């Protein structure tokens, strides 16, 4: 990956001065058109070796372009808030909306390369992270984003020369620390780790551009031209062609499916309901205060037919909890800010911290339910959403978040009865709309979409619980019981592999990461202790 960047590319001062004015003007025009049309977001990843000119290039882009439509996202060690959530959380929150350019100084590549360099990540784990990143970037591209990835390369001699030059100049000396000189000693290891990661993630939808970072003029012109050509090409092109998809496979040719097999006649008498409700609310209260839950979090996702009782079930959960410990997120049609982002973006924003619960009243499954049935997205979009949703929930589970999903099912007759009741009761009228009545005409289409959803997204980590809800009392108790039993089982099982009590996905920079105790370290420690004991013995003898 680095051969072409190691041959010493250079641009003369005269050529640079001649080309920059036209390039700046063209970049500015493309940026303004991008903002006005809001066709796509542009993600620019600036990565590379220390001293290769990453900061200078970012500063130059701000000089050449309109800073009002640029944003720079710099990532160092994760904060306490970021450590308490999946490692991709902070990157999802920083995605630029359509029409803007986001420059990432440090990105989702920085952490795995650093951990591999420190010996904290095996090659197999690095490959798994690369595969996860490829799926993430493919999702961004499928959602319309333009992803540009730059790696600035230096040879070992060029990096040493560059660091000496920066350290000797009063204006830039502050940028070179002892950590940079120590990092130079790991040059070969960094080349190996970074080269492997770049090869694994050099995909057709988001390829790497590897540049020689030793000549500022060459680096600046190349980055500017690559950005200009890529933005112009995307602005000039029609909507990207959707990849071909296999037709949905149907497995219910006998008319039976997971919904038809539910026993909707299940009921619970009032006296039993009061007893069971109190029992499971008390148990939930205890579990949410269990010391083991301090290192976990809980997400409850509610979907269901209109008037199936989602709100009532949610209220029975929240009634057992301290209001400071949970958040209820009602999900409606996306607003303008949410439409400018990938569809999962707004759900990432509401993920809970350790020791907390987030309840989603309607969820990310809208892509494969409402958007599918109503035609708000293409067939290829909702078909690929199944795997994207599974990836999303896998990331939550791997970070220690317990995901519990409910589908509340009523019969068509019971739904009609509840609709009519809501229309008659003044304080329930807000619950029934013309859209609810219209959706009843598409009952069969929605039922088929639900069956496909359960079939494709009920996983071992995040299984679906189907709730018979013609009787509200029975449904509410089943929801509470399921939450308690699942939460109790997860707490007994313990934290997932790689998640540590007190900090999730702990990522430390090289200067703050503790050294792993090896043989030589143990010898040094033993030798140091021996000297300390000798000094102490000598002091005692002197006294």
Image: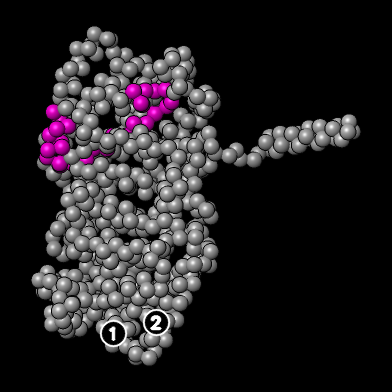
Say if 295 sits above or below 13 in the image. below
Residue 55 in view: yes
Q: Residue at x 47, y 37 (%)?
A: 114
Residue 317 forms part of the magenta stretch: no
Whether tag 2 and tag 1 are in contact, CB under 8 A, the answer is no
Q: Circle 1 sits on which residue?
A: 471
Q: How is the image coloured?
A: one colour
Q: Is 224 on the left-hand or right-hand side of 292?
A: left
What's drawn in magenta, residue-wise? Answer: 29-56
Question: Which is closer to the viewer, label 2 or label 1?
Answer: 2
**Splitting the image into 4 quarters, where does residue 378 fall?**
bottom left
Local SS, label 1 = loop
Q: Residue at x 71, y 34 (%)?
A: 524
Return the x and y of residue 30 as percentages of the image width and height.
15, 30
Residue 277 got which mark?
2
Local SS, label 2 = helix
Q: Residue at x 17, y 32 (%)?
A: 31
Q: Is 303 on the left-hand or right-hand side of 242?
A: right
- In primary-sequence order, the first of circles 2 and 1 is 2
Quadrant showing the C terminus? top right
Say if 357 sits above or below 124 in the image. below
Residue 132 in view: no
Residue 54 forms part of the magenta stretch: yes
């Amino acid at each position: 990956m680095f051969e072409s960047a190691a041959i010493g590319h250079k641009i003369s001062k005269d050529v640079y001065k001649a080309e920059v004015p036209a390039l700046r003007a063209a970049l500015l025009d493309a940026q303004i058109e991008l903002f006005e049309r809001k066709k796509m977001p542009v993600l620019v990843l600036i990565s590379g070796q220390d001293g290769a000119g990453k900061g200078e290039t970012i500063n130059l882009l701000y000089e050449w372009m309109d800073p009002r439509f640029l944003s720079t996202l710099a990532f160092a060690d994760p904060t306490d808030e970021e450590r308490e959530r999946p490692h991709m959380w902070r990157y999802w929150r920083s995605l630029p909306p359509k029409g803007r350019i986001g420059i990432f100084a440090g990105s989702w590549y920085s952490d795995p390369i650093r951990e591999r360099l420190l010996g904290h990540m095996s090659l197999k784990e690095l490959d798994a992270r690369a595969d996860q990143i490829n799926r993430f970037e493919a999702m961004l591209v499928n959602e319309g984003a333009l992803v540009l990835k730059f790696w600035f390369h230096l040879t070992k001699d060029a990096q040493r020369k560059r660091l000496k030059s920066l350290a000797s100049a009063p204006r830039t000396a502050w940028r070179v620390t002892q950590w940079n000189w120590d990092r130079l000693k790991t040059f070969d290891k960094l080349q190996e780790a970074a080269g492997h990661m770049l090869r694994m993630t050099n995909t057709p939808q988001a390829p790497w551009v590897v540049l020689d970072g030793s000549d500022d003029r060459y680096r600046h012109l190349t980055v500017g031209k690559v950005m200009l050509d890529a933005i112009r090409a995307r602005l000039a092109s029609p909507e990207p062609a959707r990849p071909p998809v296999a037709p949905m496979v149907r497995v219910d040719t006998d008319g039976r499916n997971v919904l038809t097999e539910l026993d909707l006649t299940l009921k619970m008498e009032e006296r039993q309901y009061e007893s069971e409700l109190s029992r499971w609310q008390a148990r939930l209260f205890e579990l949410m205060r269990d010391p083991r839950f301090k290192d976990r979090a809980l997400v409850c996702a509610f979907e269901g037919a209109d008037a199936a009782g989602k709100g009532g079930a949610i209220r029975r959960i929240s009634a057992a909890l301290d209001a400071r410990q949970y958040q209820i997120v009602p999900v409606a049609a996306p607003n303008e800010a949410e439409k400018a982002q990938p569809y999962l973006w707004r759900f990432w924003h509401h993920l809970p911290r350790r020791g907390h619960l987030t309840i989603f009243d309607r969820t990310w499954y809208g892509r494969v339910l409402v958007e599918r049935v109503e035609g708000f997205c293409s067939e290829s979009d909702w078909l690929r959403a199944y795997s994207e949703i599974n990836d999303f929930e896998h990331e939550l589970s791997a970070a220690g978040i317990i995901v519990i999903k409910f589908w509340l099912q009523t019969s068509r007759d019971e739904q009609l009865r509840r609709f009519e009741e809501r229309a008659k009761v003044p304080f329930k009228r807000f619950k029934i709309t013309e859209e609810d009545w219209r959706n009843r005409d598409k009952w069969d289409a929605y039922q088929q979409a639900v069956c496909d959803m359960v079939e494709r997204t009920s996983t071992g980590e995040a299984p679906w619980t189907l709730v018979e809800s013609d009787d509200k009392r029975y449904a509410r108790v089943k929801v509470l019981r399921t939450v308690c039993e699942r939460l109790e089982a997860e707490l007994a099982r313990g934290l997932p592999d790689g998640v540590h009590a007190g900090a999730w996905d702990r990522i430390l920079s090289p200067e703050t990461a503790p050294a792993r105790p090896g043989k030589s370290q143990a010898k040094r420690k033993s030798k140091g202790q021996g000297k300390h004991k000798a000094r102490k013995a000598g002091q005692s003898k002197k006294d």
